[in-house]
Amino acid sequence: MALTFFPSLKLDESASRIKAETLYRQYILPTALSDDRKELFRRDVFQKFGLEGLIALSVPKEYGGGGASYRCHYGVIEEMARGPIAFSVSVAVTNLVMGGLLAFGNEKQKENYLPKLTSGEWLGAFSLSEPQSGSDAAGLNLKATKVQSGYRLTGTKCWCSSGGDADLYLVMTRTGEHKTKDITAFLVTKNTPGFRIGKKEKKLGLRASALTELIFEDCFISEEHRLGKEGDGFAVALSQLDTGRIGIGACGTGIATAAIERMQKELNGDFGKHCQFKDAVAQKFSEYYARLQAVKMLITTASELKDQGQDIKILASQIKLLGSDLAMEVSHDLVHFLGERGVQEEEEVERFFRDAKALQIVEGTNQIQKLVLAREMEKMA
């Protein structure tokens, strides 16, 4: 039985969610287990979602997007995350690249790249992290040296989602010594000479979404591939972190919804008939349902404020923190209460658990989100 939430969905939200659910049940769920084992990302499925208008819902129509609200966008991310969330993360990351282009790109860059991304023909990747600066967004060392008509990039990025699968990489580099003012962003296509994919990580969750090193060896990037002005890179990165954090929170609510619905099904079946602690389990999951409703309301509020162009930094950190923590707690208890069945690979619940842990780490660890919120509270005081 599907859970009920408030407020009621608007007509466009409902239509996009139904389309997303139909497509992922048709094209993603049937191969979810094998794709997870093989760490396989299906480009053809991504393109199907693009052709159906679900990859770029919030991008303006003139660039091939849906021109819809962020409520629609995050609703689709959440709906897809009720299945394997690796696909949802790939969609969300591509939207970070599109968001950077919309905010800082010139008209030629928008015309060249956005239609390919919005249609699903191209996959985007967003690269900020480096080995020594996982949580320090400004602590990067990938060097971009100014040369005639462009820059030479030398160094390594790490933990790049969709690395190797992506066609366009939004990469942050260092063009000077100042920690934040000398960061510059570049658009790097996959076949650029001097750029290659390094180590692919073996990881706990999100297995169907590649996580890789990016290696730049005297890689020439022309000025026309610089996004924004020299020194705008930190602003480019920050402009998309809020969007990404809400997306991860939405993935968390997707996992939590699926996990709670699964437990309801178990309690109404044989598990419930023989469980000595049925009432205690039901009460615990009713608390999760209440918390889930609260996080979903935060996402609704943040989406509406984002549509109005307002600052949502603090809400984004709250949503990322609460949504991913909730997903972790719910999936943990679902695995625990189901016992041996809960840890079997054939049962999707163990994937919920593995994927939920990844959500607590990506887009700024939850400890970083707490630090952001603590600093904001100091300002309030």
Image: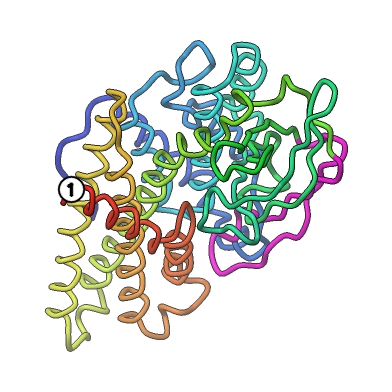
Give the residues drawn in magenta, as a range: 190-218
Q: Is residue 209 a member of the stretch shown in magenta?
A: yes
Q: Residue at x 36, y 44 (%)?
A: 246
Q: Position of residue 284 (x, y in %)?
A: 17, 73
**Image-based side of 171 in relation to 151, left or right:** left
Vertical side of 236 occupied by 164: above or below: below
Looking at the picture, which amino acid does disc 1 mark? Met
**Vertical position of residue 31 compared to residue 22: above or below:** below
Residue named by callout 1: 380
**Residue 344 spot, x, y in % from top left:** 49, 78
Pointer 1: residues within 10 angstroms few (<14), some, or many (20+)? few
Q: Position of residue 268 (x, y in %)?
A: 20, 70
Task: Pick out the residue farthest to the front.
Answer: 177
Residue displayed at 27% across by 71% down: 266
Left or right of residue 254, residue 36 in this image: right
The answer to if 142 sits in the magenta stretch is no
- Give the colouring mode of the picture: rainbow
Is residue 271 shown above or below 195? below
Q: Quadrant of residue 242?
A: top left
Indicate the quadrant containing the N terminus: top left, top right, bottom left or bottom right: bottom left
**Of 242 and 61, the residue lying toward us:** 242
Residue 232 horizontal/vertical position (percent): 56, 30
Q: Residue at x 27, y 57 (%)?
A: 374
Please state if 212 lies on the left or on the right of 237 as rendered.
right
**Picture quadrant of residue 325:** bottom left
- Check disc 1 and report its element: helix, strand or loop: helix
- In this rendering, the answer to whether 299 lies above or below 58 is below
